[in-house]
Image: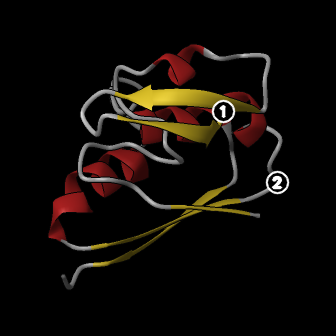
Amino acid sequence: LILLGIGEDGHTSSLFPGTEALKENKLFMAPNFVPKLGVPRITSTYHLLRFSRAIWFVTRGPSKEPYIRALAKQDPAAAFPAAKVLSDRGTVEIYHCTSP
């Protein structure tokens, strides 16, 4: 079981939009510099997430709702990092609290 959140820009697991780790397809973990934060991070890669038997997104607040709706629809055109986790796995559950 892997528990993930979703950031206000659609990032998950330190996989931020436009960063290099999004392209990693061999390593399970990768360094990932996040320009908007000005810091390096270590992230699980999509390659690792594909091996999970279950992924749960646990989120809260109205700013996450557009991402939750896109995940629930399994929209293949969704262009944010958390959406790619859904396209790689068949067993993903979403738990969202609408209160801030």
Looking at the image, tell me whether mark 2 or mark 1 is earlier in sequence order: 1
Which of the image's four quarters has the N terminus? bottom right
Which of the image's four quarters has the C terminus? bottom left
Mark 2 or mark 1, whichever is nearer to me: 1
Which residue is the site of mark 1?
45
Percent position of residue 10, x then y = 32, 44
Secondary structure state at the residue bearing disc 1: loop
Viewer-proximal residue among 73 and 56: 56
Kindly identify the amino acid type of the residue bearing the numbered disc 1: Thr
Mark 2–mark 1 distance (CA, rounded to whole Å): 15 Å
Tag 2–tag 1 contact (CB < 8 Å): no
Viewer-proximal residue among 23 and 95: 23
The residue located at (61%, 29%) in the rendering is: 31
Viewer-proximal residue among 19 and 49: 19
Q: How many C-alpha atoms fall within 10 Å of the one at disc 1: few (<14), some, or many (≥20)?
A: many
Secondary structure state at the residue bearing disc 2: loop
> Picture quarter containing residue 6?
bottom left
Could you tell whether 79 is left or right of 49 in the image? left
Kindly identify the amino acid type of the residue bearing the numbered disc 2: Arg
Viewer-proximal residue among 40 and 60: 40
Which residue is the site of mark 2?
53
Could you tell whether 77 is left or right of 2 in the image? left
Could you tell whether 19 is left or right of 26 in the image? left
Percent position of residue 26, x then y = 79, 17
Percent position of residue 9, x then y = 25, 43
